[in-house]
Amino acid sequence: MNSSRITYTAPGKIILFGEHAVVYGYPALAIAIDRRAKCTVSSYSSDEDVVLSTNLYPGKTFLVSCKESFPSSLQAILFLIKKLIDNFQSNLPLQIDISSSIPSSSGLGSSAAVSVALTNSLSTFLGGNYSLEDVNKIAFEAEKIQHGQPSGIDNNISTYGGSILYQNGLMEQITIDDFSGFWVIANSMIERNTKDIVANVQKNYKRKQEKTEEIFHLIHSIVIRGKECIKNNKLDEIGELMKENQTLLEQLGVGHSKVTDLLLILKKNGSVGEKLTGAGVGGCVVGLFDNIKDAHSAIKNIKKKGYQAFTANYTKIGVTIDD
Ligand code: PMV
C-alpha cells in the first residue's frame, strides 16, 4: 500500500451515434461528459474484510465478507473487489466508498465509470501500477457481468475520456476542440436494464436478420458522416443525423413514449437535433443546441414536466486520480 487513502474518478458518456449496432461490430461515436463516478479506497480497522459504502444504493453499507444478499446490479462491483484482492493477495481490511453524479440505469455509462474508477483506485491502493489498458480490460470484464454482451464502448470512453470512434475493441480518438454546440441531457426517469434491452434486440435480430442488418448499415453510414461533421463543427448536419439515428433506433424497437415526449420538448425549444442515448426503452435523451439560451429554456421546460435535465460538457479527462 502506497498511501492511506486513494481516490480516482471516471467520466460518464453520451453515445452520439451507433448504439446497439456497435454490439454487432459496427462503429459508434461517443463523447465523455463532465459527470463522474468517484471511488475512494482506504484502510479500515475492523474484523470485516471489506466495507463498501455507496450512494448507488442510498443508506446501504455492505460488509462484503458477510455475504449479505446483494442487489444483482452490485455483482460487477463485487467481482472487481474480489478479483483485485486476489490479484494482489491482500488481506487488508478495506473501506471502499463509491459515489456518482451520473444517473444510473439511464444510458450514460454509470456502471462502466464506477468499474473504471474502482479498478484504478483499488489496484493502486493495493500497490499495483496498472496501465490505462489494464484498467480498461478489467473494467470490461465487470461490464460483461453487468451487461451480458457489451460492446466495450462504455469502459473505453470512461477510461480514456475525450471523443472516440469505437469498433470491435478498437478505438480512434477524435479531436473536437472547435465544437460550438451545447448538449442537453434529459432523463425520462424510466430506469432500464441494458442487458435485457440488448437481449431483446438480439431476439429481433434473429427473427428479422435481413431487415435488422439493413438498419445497422444505415446507422453505420450515419456514424461515418457524423464523425466528419463533429470534427468540422457542422451543427445542423449533426442534428439531422441525430434525428435519422433516432428513427432507426425506433425501428429497432428501443423507443419509449416518454422518450418521444422529451424529444418533442427539445425540438419545440429549438434543438437542432435530438435522439435517445444508450440502450433506450427509457433512460436519457440528448439534444444539441446552437446557443445556450435555448438550451437553458429547454431544461426549464423539461423540468416543469417533472423530468430531470442538465447541460453536459464534453471532457477530455478520462480516469484520473483525485488529490
Ligand atoms: O445504456 P448504456 O449506457 O448501458 O449503453 C448501452 C449501449 C449499447 O450499444 C446498447 C450496448 C453496448 O454494449 O454498446
Image (cartoon, rainbow, N blue to C red):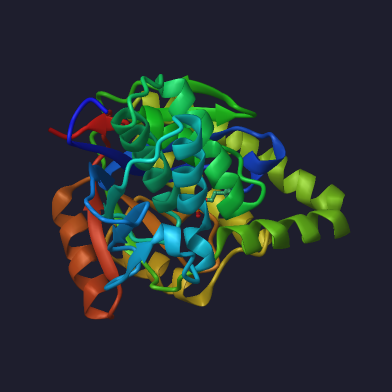
Residue 50 screen position, x and y as percent: 35, 52
Q: Is residue 318 visible?
A: yes
Q: Tell me: residue 203, above or below residue 290.
A: below
| 265 is higher (above) or lower (below) than 127 | below
Q: Quadrant of residue 176?
A: top left
In the picture, measured across the screen, residue 238 lies left or right of residue 44, that is: right
Residue 98 image point, x, y percent: 29, 53
Residue 159 placement: quadrant: top left
Please identify the quadrant where the N terminus is shown: top left
Q: Tell me, yes or no, if residue 105 can be seen here.
A: no
Question: x and y percent of residue 256 in the render?
Answer: 54, 72
With 144 as the anchor, is 185 left or right in this view?
A: left
Q: Closer to the camera, 211 or 130?
A: 130
Q: Residue at x 62, y 40 (%)?
A: 22
Outermost residue on the bottom side: it is: 305
Q: Quadrant of residue 40?
A: top left
Quadrant of the snapshot with the C terminus? top left
Q: Pick the residue in front: 235 or 132.
A: 132
Residue 248 locus on image (x, y percent): 63, 54
Number of numbered markers:
0
Front residue of 156 and 60: 60
Is 183 located above or below residue 164 in the figure?
A: below
Q: In percent of the image, x 62 and y 48: which residue is there?
A: 20
- In the displayed structure image, the side of residue 133 where residue 184 appears, left or right: left
